[in-house]
Image: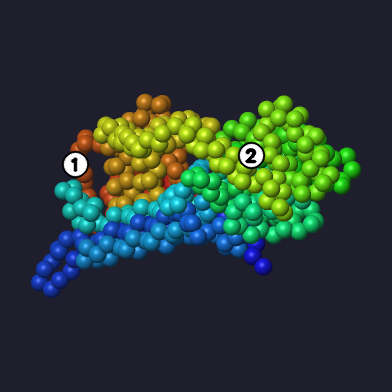
Amino acid sequence: MSRFVDRAVIHVAAGDGGHGCASVHREKYTPLGGPDGGNGGHGGDVVLVVDPGVHTLLDFHYRSQARASSGKPGQGGHRNGATGEDLELRVPDGTVVLTPDGEVLADLVGVGTRFVVVAGGHGGLGNAALASKARKAPGFALLGEEGEARDLVLELKSVADIGLVGFPSAGKSSLVSVLSAARPKIADYPFTTLVPNLGVVTAGETVFTVADVPGLIPGASQGKGLGLEFLRHIERCAVLVHVVDCATVDPGRDPLSDVDALERELAAYTPSLGGELASRPRLVVLNKIDVPDARELAEMVRPELQARGLPVYCVSTVSTEGLRELRFALGAAVRQHRESLPPTEPTRVVLRPTAVDEQGFEVTADPDRPEGFIVRGGRPEQWIRQTNFDNAEAVGYLADRLARLGVEDALAGAGARAGCPVTIGHVTFDWEPSTPAGGGAIRLGGRGTDWRLDSDQRIGAGQRKAARRVRREPVAGGEVPQE
């Protein structure tokens, strides 16, 4: 038996970037062939795509983890690693993507809508791409970055123009079946409807969709019965229809009290999308007038409901009496709603590139370490992630990049002194100022070494990261041993 799942918690992880390659071209009779290490491939993204053939989140209920493929490492001979393939996850139309804390990240409406939930890591540059006048044959390459990973909550909110609400066994499913070609389950016991049913209705030139939800009971907005679980399926509806059972034999119930109870539940429920449900246009359908006593009761309460400003329609899903009038009334309400919407304008994408002299980082005091500082910024943190701290030349290259970016000058301006702990990303080091970038020519040693890390001279911020005083902080996936 098929299951309907409209909420799922998943863990998604993008692919890691491939490492760059540190290689030197070797060929007979061709000494010093130069660096030829290729770049690593980027990791694949995880993308949610709206698919018209998917109607439930059941697949995510059984497979709650998804990971895209990683990029391949670079190779010698200037061969770049292959890029990881994106992982596309098919979701139903109307899926809302949230964080575990309830923050809405995306509302996926419309076939083909795409949303990148986690991005793949960048591939590391090979030593061929790192070669320069100062470093003609780098003995290192950059590491690939890890892909993003996060937990997500997926909620399905049906996309329908008309929402039918009412008590259990009020005839909502029967109404959908006679207005459209849908064939929902119909029985004479409460809570027959366990999943939202959607039907397509045609009224003249207007085509619209109708959805019914499991029966509401008093307290549904606080979690009683099935109402709270499925009330979100009418959040997108333009018009709400109260379906009232005029032939009920339950003591203490009548059409007026049923409408009042439904109004209270709609007012108490706070939707995450759109306006309040109680402010939506509403109609009242007095159902089952094929029963003589029910017809008499419907005629009795109809004037009072109309006095409240509610359009009222008396129908019978058995004899189909009143259904034509109801169908065109619903079509007119939907048409009026669509005409009231503002015209759709083409989306304009405004590109604001970052200024070339933008530092892109900030230096703040570290609240957890006395006299400590934290450097935050996209580029410094990315460079930290891509540095192989087991290679002294790679650390020296990092030191030069940080100095050129102005990190050392900013630390000095913030009051940092020699020996102050400085944290960038997941790495903490003891800072000592060095010669500003450009103050002198870069003096290189052998491949994979850096003279500043092999001497007893004072060394700067970036250079300390691979030295003996580097302390790595715990990161996701376990503890990083201190050096």
In front here: 184 or 467?
184
User: N-terminal of the two: label 1 or label 2?
Assistant: 2
Displayed quadrant of residue 221: top right
Color theme of the render? rainbow
Question: Label 2 is placed on what type of residue?
Answer: Leu
In front here: 242 or 442?
242
Judged from the image, the secondary structure of the residue bearing numbered disc 2 is: strand
Mark 1 neighbour class, 10 Å CA radius: few under 14, some 14 to 19, many 20 or more: few
In percent of the image, x 14 and y 63: which residue is there? 32
In percent of the image, x 40 and y 49: which residue is there? 385
Residue 57 in percent (x, y) is at 58, 57
Residue 296 in percent (x, y) is at 81, 40
Residue 189 in percent (x, y) is at 80, 56
Residue 217 in percent (x, y) is at 78, 43
Which dot marks residue 462?
none
In this view, 359 is above or below 72: above
Judged from the image, the secondary structure of the residue bearing numbered disc 1 is: loop
User: Which residue, given by chain and number where applicable, does mark 1 sit on?
Assistant: 441
Displayed quadrant of residue 188: bottom right
In percent of the image, x 49 and y 56: which residue is there? 52
* In this rendering, position of residue 144 left or right of residue 266: left
Of the two numbered discs 1 and 2 in the rendering, the one whose residue sits closer to the viewer:
2
* In this rendering, position of residue 29 left or right of residue 60: left
**Cα–Cα gap, marks 1 and 2:** 75 Å
* In this rendering, position of residue 38 left or right of residue 144: left
In percent of the image, x 60 and y 63: which residue is there? 62
Question: Label 1 is placed on what type of residue?
Answer: Ala
In front here: 190 or 363?
190
* In this rendering, position of residue 286 left or right of residue 158: right
User: Which residue, given by chain and number where applicable, does mark 2 sit on?
Assistant: 240
